Image: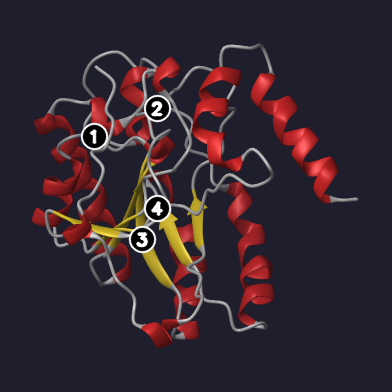
Amino acid sequence: MTYRPPRPTDAQRVVWPEDFGTRFTVFVDVEEEFDWRAPHDSRNRATTAMAAFPDAHRRFAERGVALTCMIDHPIATDPASVAILSRVVEDGRSEIGTQLHAWVNPPFEGAATSAASYAGNLPRALEAAKLETLTSAITTAFGAAPRAYRAGRYGIGPHSFDLLAALGYRIDSSVRPGYDYSGDGGPDFSMADAGAYRARGIVELPLTTVFTGRARQGGAWLYRALGRVPKGRGYSRARACCRGSR
């Protein structure tokens, strides 16, 4: 069954102070190397691309931008990657967060299907075991427990918030408003919005996704309709991009 996060109540919404202004949190998905077009394989754990990370971090640091590095199991258990990221957090502002790629994160049970790549689809006990394994690996590698989480492939599920809260997490950023992964066995965020809210001890910070342009009021409906047309969503984005560049 497709997971659709329930819409938060008004009481759950985060109300920012008037002087809070406009702020951004930069999450960086730091993960192993693999081909999205190929089947998921637990053996795909290469991390050689991490050699380029220090230069990327330097560019952000020079502009005063902190990074929240969401790392998965291959990164957290690779000494070279840990050494690189340990220097990153020495800037005093960046942090290490968690990203769960279920197909490369032990323990492994069952077939590596597309649906099983969304951690929130797994049986509660298996999702919990994978989260515990990854959280422990990150805590051991960096000497501090991570506080922020993102499910790989945005694959949050009905048990995820409770499991995260039990492990001491404070923030989740798995909700991707406007996107529907149900055709691949994943969650449906097509009716979600970008507002932050609290749920079961976790603050949800959705990715910033909004509909713009003249048809924005019907954006959610249009998105679903174009999903039934081959390459329809890609065409609509290209048109919007071209209009915006004039």
Residue highlighted by disc 4: 206
Q: Is residue 146 above or below residue 61?
A: above
Q: CA distance from mark 4 to mark 2?
A: 28 Å
> In the depicted view, which residue is nearer to us: 21 or 95?
21
99 horizontally vs 40: left or right:
left
Q: Is residue 52 visible?
A: yes
Tell me the residue that label 2 is attached to: 42
Can you tell which of label 4 and label 3 is closer to the viewer?
4
Residue 190 is drawn in which quadrant?
top left
Q: Which residue is mark 1?
A: 157
For label 4, the crowd category at 10 Å Cα-Cα, with few meaning under 14, some 14 to 19 and many 20 or more, is some
Q: Tell me the mark number nearer the camera, choosing from 1 and 3.
A: 1
Residue type (three-letter) at the residue carrying disc 4: Pro
Gap in angstroms between the C-alphas marked 4 and 1: 15 Å
On the image, the x and y values in percent for residue 85 come to 48, 67
Please report whichever mark, 1 or 3, sits nearer to the chain's N-terminal start. Answer: 3
The residue where tag 3 is placed is 97
The residue type indicated by label 2 comes to: Ser
| First of labels 2, 3 by sequence position | 2
